[in-house]
Image (spheres, rainbow, N blue to C red):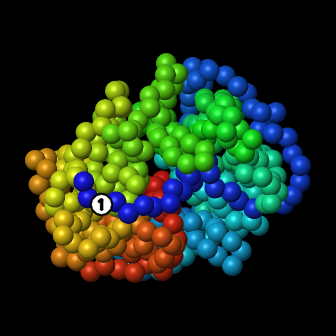
Amino acid sequence: MRYRRGLAWLLLGLVGCSSATSPTSQPQPSANVIVAEPSAIPAATSAPTVAATLQPSPTVSSQLLPQPLYALSSQPNGVQIVRLETDGKTLTPITSEQNGVFDYQISNLGQIAYIANNDLILVDALGQNREILVDGPTIDPQADTNVFHRDQLNTPRWSPDGSSIAFSWGGLQVLNLIDRKQTMLQPHTSNTDAALADIYDYSVLYGPNSWSPDGSKILAAAGFVPEGGNLVLFDLATSAPLTITINGNYPCCHVSWEPDGSAINVTNEVFGMFPTGWWHINPSTGEAKAMIDGDNVAPFQPVSSVFMQPDDSHLAFVGTVDSNDPMEISAPLTLSRIGLDGSITPLRQDSQTVGSVLWSPDGSGAVIIPSIMAETQLQWVPSNGSAIADLALSGANMQWAIALDQ
């Protein structure tokens, strides 16, 4: 096994981070939550529609990107959602929240759900028709860690049909937008460890990572307090949880579903506490299969963010590190094609440090954050080997606009 440099564990962002809001005492989440078994979630009979007042996006004279792009970006008034048009230059502010935006996601219908001021908020694709869906308690920014664990809203995640939003608030919850019913799937686990109970009220914090493509399951992150964690897959029909690890380790760090739901991809390009490479997780059994064992078989091959193509091959950013190379936490990666036989073919002649990756829906390229540690200028990296383009946006959590918005 390749030597691993110790990295400080960051408790899962979806449940461990905190945002600053004004200090006012408010009820705990349990006072406003309907607690029910997962089977009580009502089936969607119709899907909400994009607001009729949605205006067309600005006209641009050139096209670099396949679709408009959204990201969280630091602005003079805090972190906000900003939209970049297909020319890679024209910017449109989407939100202007007093204390900034904490997290967001775009639905397959073009609506945006985001967290701001500890509320779950809904807007259309251009930030109009703002509606507070869940009014969370105001949290004193100087409050104890346990207050944040108990009261903070996190990680809105849309169901594939756009009818429901999973989020974290006192546990893993689902809000159905058809009847506005709110259901607690899995509350945070109270601490029973006598050595830690005086410090931490909870031992496990739950929040959604993503829905399965058919909407029948929710993949959730379980963050252990004060450190560690794993993934848990909740079947909404049976309410049965399935814990997922990779050889006993937390599955980190880029997680995505295959389009047909047959597997969960886990990739990691950072040498450290977690296995590097590419792993397939069977969503029925939780079994983990190494597609590329990144740091146990030389030459070591860290992998970031696989993307399935129509012929079932995959695109990914892949690195190659010899056993006698100087230790690097993050090695340079090259945009490559991984064949069905496991062969790796570079599609570009350059390599770069890669943080987050957002593949274009057609596989023509990817938007990347060329850093693993900070918000930096986004880049467009074409799959055909043509020149990398710097985009007029620095940010994180990139997401594409959908076809309805074009």
Dot 1 lies on which element?
loop
Whether residue 131 is visible to the viewer of this picture, yes or no, is no
Q: Could you tell whether 128 is left or right of 372 in the image? A: right
Whether residue 351 is visible to the viewer of this picture, yes or no, is yes
Q: Residue 160 appears at what percent x and percent y? A: 47, 40
Q: Residue 395 appears at what percent x and percent y? A: 52, 71
Residue at the image position 72 percent from the left and 45 percent from the top: 199
Q: Could you tell whether 18 is left or right of 346 in the image? A: right
Q: Image height check: is 110 above or below 285?
A: below
Across the whole image, how many numbered discs are drawn on residues? 1
Q: Could you tell whether 51 is left or right of 280 in the image? A: right
Q: Image height check: is 154 above or below 89?
A: above
Residue at the image position 58 percent from the left and 23 percent from the top: 38
Q: Could you tell whether 65 is left or right of 234 in the image? A: left
Looking at this rendering, what residue extends furthest in the right direction? 25
Front-lying residue, 47 or 372: 372
Q: Quadrant of residue 378?
A: bottom left
Disc 1 residue crowd, few under 14, some 14–19, many 20+, Cα 10 Å: few
Q: Quadrant of residue 181?
A: top right
Front-lying residue, 343 or 88: 343
Residue at the image position 70 percent from the left and 25 percent from the top: 35
Which residue type carries mark 1? Tyr
Residue at the image position 75 percent from the left and 62 percent from the top: 20
- For disc 1, the marked residue is 3
